[in-house]
Image (tube, helix red, strand yellow):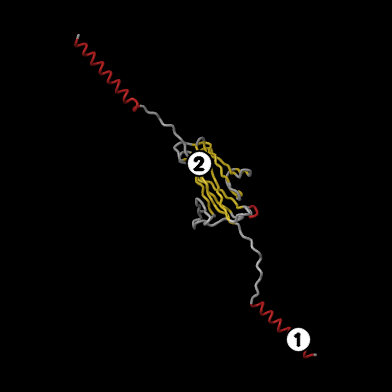
Amino acid sequence: MKKLFLIFLATFIFAARVSADAGQYGQYGQYEPSTPSGSMSIDKTVSHGEQTKGGITQYVDNYIAEDPRFTAGQKVYFQIKVKNTSNVTLKNIQLQDILPAYLDPSEGPGNYNPDSKTISWSYPELKAGEGKIENVVGIVVDQSRMPADKGLFCVSNKSTVKADNVYDEDSAQFCIEKQVVGAKAVPQAGPEYGLLLTTLSFAGLGAGIYLKKKV
């Protein structure tokens, strides 16, 4: 009887240990898959339109006041790069390019809303790691539409991208300079003008001498 009791007790202790071990390591052994999340990036750059010897337009992130400026009627070139930086496919990609004051649209994708000065377009989807590039061209407005109290000022052009809960934006700055319209220059009297006056003076003097002799 005592022997059977000991066997039963040993079996109970072993079962309890197995149950405890299972409870201790069970929390580490369970696998819960992570929910994939999307992410996107947008990069906005600007250019005067300068090209390399290979015909490639050179873009920069921003122009400051000390850089070459734009004037009335000049084209401003923008490049917009958008990329799906996640590992999932993103759908219904909505993009907007918001033009600043003193810049009218010239070329670009999508549709333009003159009330909000916004160019809008979309992509059905972007696969993981996929990117696209778009170009937008604007024209600086006539000088009569610029602020009267400013000769030099800088503005920014912003682009945005969104899909579901994913959003990003970027801007590119450039500066506009008004051209000073001066008064018409008065022609200066040069040596030729003085020689002409001298010739006329001698001619008049000669005529006077001739008339005096004749009298």
Rendered image quadrant of residue 212: bottom right
Furthest residue in direction right, as rendered: 215
Residue at 56% x, 42% y: name it.
96
Q: Position of residue 50 (x, y in %)?
A: 53, 56
Task: Indicate which label's residue lies in the foreground, 2 or 1.
Answer: 1
Give the labeled residue for mark 1. Answer: 208
Total tally of numbered discs in the picture: 2
Furthest residue in direction front, as rendered: 149
Q: Position of residue 107 (x, y in %)?
A: 59, 49
Of residues 205 and 3, the one nearer the viewer is 205
Q: Locate residue 214 relative to residue 134 in the image: left or right.
A: right
Rendered image quadrant of residue 204: bottom right
Pick whichever of labels 2 and 1 is earlier in the sequence: 2
Q: Secondary structure at mark 1?
A: helix
The amino acid type, in three-letter code, at marker 1 is Gly
Position of residue 77 relative to residue 96, above or below, is: below
The amino acid type, in three-letter code, at marker 2 is Asp
Q: Position of residue 177 (x, y in %)?
A: 58, 56
Position of the C terminus by quadrant: bottom right
Task: Give me the C-alpha separation between circle 2 and circle 1.
Answer: 91 Å
Furthest residue in direction top, as rendered: 1
Give the labeled residue for mark 2. Answer: 168
Of residues 213 and 74, the one nearer the viewer is 213
The label number, if any, that marks residue 69 in the structure image = none
Q: Locate residue 112 relative to residue 129 in the image: left or right.
A: right
Q: Secondary structure at mark 2?
A: strand
Q: Position of residue 43 (x, y in %)?
A: 50, 46
Position of residue 65 relative to residue 162, above or below, is: below
